[in-house]
Amino acid sequence: MIPSHFKIHIMSLIAIHKTKMSIVILAAAFVTLCSAKAFEHANFAGDWKLDESKSDLGQFGGRMAARTIKVNNYADSVTFDITSKNMQGDDVKRTERLTFDGKESNIVLSPNASKKSTAKWSDDGKSLNVNSTVSFTRDGQTTEIKVTDVWTLSADGSTLNLQSNSSSSFGESSMTLVYTKAK
């Protein structure tokens, strides 16, 4: 027969063990919820059209700014189907795919121009930061333009804002582009 003081001690150990298990389970659940929250990002998916009246097209008048963008979000990447104008005013279409693993994407813009980009979500997941280097060759000379783009959405998801800053041998430039979502 087990003395009663041992029974009380054993029951106390069992209660402590159950409490510790409950704490471990709660902690695991908390970490899981926090991790899931950390992977929630702004959803830029949709068809977007440049609203020139709300945009600041910068010193170059936004000649090369995308006029329309179709965005597809995926868990590990985002694609942009972009329509812009070239120097002659003709529509130019291209697709850019950026991954979130830090790998650089390479896009051929023309026979003499290319673009290398990386994308990274902000810590709060509300903005997408894209760093690019655009290289073009003209008359045997290669020029590089460093571009930093920050993509954000309005609270209601109907407006996409793109803050674009560039730096090159031509100087510094910035544009604030505002896109409205097609209905």
Image: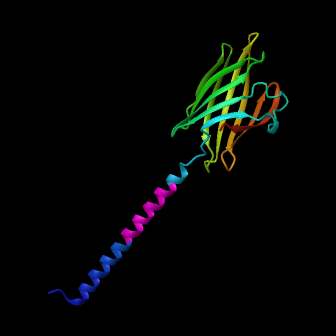
**Residue lying at 28% horizontally and 81% vertically, measured from the top left:** 11
Q: Is residue 30 magenta?
A: yes
Q: Quadrant of the N terminus?
A: bottom left
Per the picture, the main secondary structure of the magenta-coloured stretch is helix
Q: What residue is rendered at 69% in x and 47% in y?
A: 154
Side of 10 relative to 47 (left or right)? left
**In terms of image quadrants, where is residue 7?**
bottom left
Examine the image and state in which quarter residue 96 appears. Answer: top right
Q: Residue furthest right?
A: 59
Residue at 72% x, 37% y is: 179
Identity of the residue furthest to the bottom in this view? 4
Q: How is the image coloured?
A: rainbow
Residue 80 in the image: x percent, y percent?
61, 30
Magenta-colored stretch includes residue 170: no
Question: Quick check: 114 above or below 17?
Answer: above
Q: In the image, residue 109 lies at what x, y percent?
A: 66, 19
Measured as percent of width and height from the top left, residue 116 is found at 63, 26
Q: Residue at x 40, y 65 (%)?
A: 24
Magenta segment boundaries in residue numbering: 20-34
Query: How many discs mark residues in the rendered view?
Result: 0
Q: Position of residue 111 (x, y in %)?
A: 66, 13
Name the residue furthest top. 139
**Is residue 169 shown above or below 56?**
above
What residue occupies the far front of the structure in this picture? 183
Q: Quadrant of the C terminus?
A: top right
In this orientation, which residue lies closer to the viewer: 67 or 106?
A: 67
Q: In the shown orientation, is residue 114 left or right of residue 30?
A: right
